[in-house]
Amino acid sequence: MISQALLKQFDLNGPRYTSYPTADRFSTDVAVPELEEALAQVANTSRPTSLYVHIPFCRSLCYYCACNKVVTKSLVAADQYVDSLSQEIALVAKHTGRLRIAQLAFGGGTPNFLSLEQFARLFNSLHAHFELLGSREQSIEVDPRYLDDGYAGGLHELGFNRVSFGVQDFDERVQKLIHRFQSFEQTARAVREFRAAGFESVSFDLVYGLPIQSRESFAETLERTLLLDPERVALFNYAHIPERFKAQRRIPNEALPTIDQRVELFLYARERLVDAGYVAIGLDHFAKPSDALAAAFKSGSLRRNFQGYSTHQGTQLIGLGASAISQLDSCYTQNAPQLDAYYARLADGRLPTYRGISLTRDDRIRARVIESIMCEGRVMWAAIEQEFVISAQHYFTNEIRSLEKMQDSGVVNISGDTFHVSEPGRLLLRAVAMIFDAHRARPLQQVASESVHPVRFSSIA
Ligand code: SF4
């Protein structure tokens, strides 16, 4: 049994470790020159690459949202954006040459804000500069409320084969408080259309910890989810940070579930999804055993990057679009989040990146340990020692002491040269990972004066 005091850490608004170091450690001291150098290194490897394209536009504002987005009804706004993306693609390719793309993901915002014509234009640029592998995984986040007839088929013709729907909660009373009105029928129709168009995998994003959610109401959302039979479910914890995300101020504090209720919601959802045959993966993902994510989890090849969990080992990630993050061997960099700044840099013929972090050897070692915790819930020291030629006992003396304390609390089990996060301890996966986060010892304002990367709830991974 884990104590209440420890369980409180479950609710911390800490990193989800889609990377280490985390994006809130980025500094404007690292930007274009470092990215250019890293891109040149990508050019010299034969490793396949992942691309992430951020589409920031949304037609309406969801109050809980912490993504980088621009709320507008003007389709014309996206024309300029598509032109700028094409420019950015050409600029990146100037440094990398014709990369082989194994994975291509569109996130937002709302990627289906773009018309099929705008997508076609974008794909002309992508095909002109990169080799999009025939076997590639190509995914898109879709808002089911805004789907034209034939849209799913059009996307499939462009090579999309995976879709992730933002659902959050089917309860209309919750939807009212978060300002996201989405009927069950809208979601069901979207699922039907994408399946009929030939999409191989459907994923749902659900959020717990939203106002007035109760076990009973969330149970109903889960039953409706199961009716629609998605291959994957991502179950995100709502992080209420109204001082940082203005729209969240419209959500009444007193309507939010308490920490005990949030734990109950998560545990119930986890149990129900596992009962229904899903494999629980990492922090907050569930996948059918036949799904690639579950297979990667089982074989120990699951990876974590800025898009969340990934089945692609050894790839480097290049982010395109406002606020997009690139995750390369020598550094991580982020593009300007504001559209004006993003456009202005490209208009000057510069890569639109504005901040980042160069990785040290220590960062790489810790990143590997943290990734292992977040993906597999365990660390086998022998593998880390072999990869980095270190003695874990010496390198992580203090961290291992902290792990021993966590063992006394029932969060981890240490045996031989391996430690596992216990089944109840999985609630505290982030807290375990945090033990290895050397950057957290430094005050945040010393390393990043800009706003931190947003917490996201509509991630595809
Ligand atoms: S949750 Fe999604 S659709 Fe809603 S405002 Fe945020 S990015 Fe846009």
Image: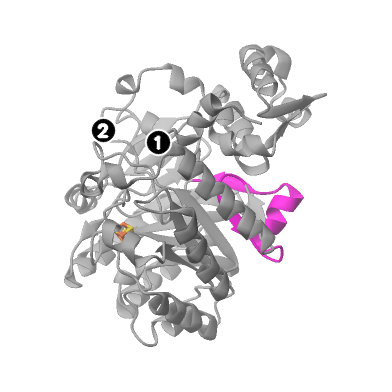
Q: How is the image coloured?
A: one colour
**Quadrant of ligand 1 in image:** bottom left
Q: Is residue 125 magenta?
A: no
Secondary structure under tag 2 reads: loop
Q: Residue at x 48, y 30 (%)?
A: 8
Disc 1 marks a residue whose amino acid type is Ala
- Image: magenta residue range: 282-305
Q: Residue at x 29, y 57 (%)?
A: 178
Q: Quadrant of residue 33?
A: top left
Q: Nearer the viewer, residue 31 or 46?
A: 31
Which of the two discs, 1 and 2, labels the residue nearer the N terminus? 1
Secondary structure under tag 1 reads: helix
Q: Quadrant of residue 150?
A: bottom left
Q: Position of residue 435 (x, y in %)?
A: 56, 23
- Quadrant location of the N terminus? top right
Residue 259 vertical placement versus 285 (above, below): above
Pointer 1: residues within 10 angstroms few (<14), some, or many (20+)?
many
Q: Is residue 406 found left or right of 113 in the rendered image?
A: right
Q: Nearer the viewer, residue 459 or 82?
A: 459
Q: Is residue 295 magenta?
A: yes
Question: What's the mark number on residue 450?
Answer: 2
Q: Position of residue 104 (x, y in %)?
A: 49, 62
Pointer 2: residues within 10 angstroms few (<14), some, or many (20+)?
few
Q: Is residue 454 found left or right of 417 in the rendered image?
A: left
Kindly identify which residue carries mark 1: 23
Question: What's the mark number on residue 310?
Answer: none
Disc 2 marks a residue whose amino acid type is Glu
Q: Position of residue 399 (x, y in %)?
A: 62, 17
Can the viewer see residue 244 in this picture?
yes
